[in-house]
Image (cartoon, helix red, strand yellow):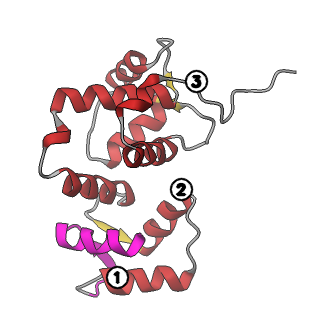
Amino acid sequence: MSVPFLGRRRSSSIKKEFSEKELNELRIAFDLLDRNQDGQVTTREFKIMLNNLGIDLKQNKVDELIRSASHAGKELIDENDFLKFVKQIQDLCDLRNSKDDDEQDLVAAFTVFDMDNDGYITKDELRIAMEMIGEEVSEDQLTHIMEVADTDKDGKINYEVNLILEFAQLLS
């Protein structure tokens, strides 16, 4: 019986294109995409992420994107494929030179936490997102984060850049 490809990564020079911090952040992003943690992202997993970011693409376009990013031309990408894909997007958009990178990253992170795309993060969404990234958070910690970040005391964290900055500081 053969052992499936789990946790092993192809070696690649693409990793040299990113700083250590960027590489760590991209690995976290890849792990968030890889919902079943099998070391590969499927078109379904990728489409869920796009939808969470408010990007609604037809399935055939998502299939095409993943196939073009895949080293094997299949509808699966591994971490190295993902890194190459991100690098291509960065080069096309020249994101590295943008002043708003940190703010855009925080907004993108917020939208991933906002699972129902309503512009708010609820305590349940926060709990699920923290579990997805492997971060153990107690009920007291969740309550504390919500109390601090929920400035209008409506039980939700609002989608405002200054609140996102506070929220990010709470998580770090």
Give the residue displayed 41% in from the left and 69% down from the top.
Answer: 172
The earlier-in-sequence mark between 2 and 1 is 2
92 to 112, vertically: above or below: above
Residues drawn in magenta = 153-172
Tell me the quarter of the picture where residue 58 sits: top left
Residue type marked 2: Met
Give the number of the mark in front: 3 or 2: 3
The dot on residue 155 is 1
35 to 39, vertically: above or below: below
Give the residue displayed 74% in from the left and 27% down from the top.
Answer: 4
Instruction: Answer with left or right where residue 2 lies relative to residue 99.
Output: right
Would residue 166 be counted in the magenta stretch?
Answer: yes
Give the residue displayed 45% in from the left and 47% down from the top.
Answer: 24
For the residue labelled by badge 3, is the local secondary structure a helix, a strand or a loop?
loop
Instruction: Answer with left or right where residue 108 lies relative to residue 45.
Output: left
The dot on residue 10 is 3
Query: Is 172 or 131 nearer to us in this picture?
Result: 172
Give the number of the mark in front: 2 or 1: 2
Residue under numbered circle 2: 132
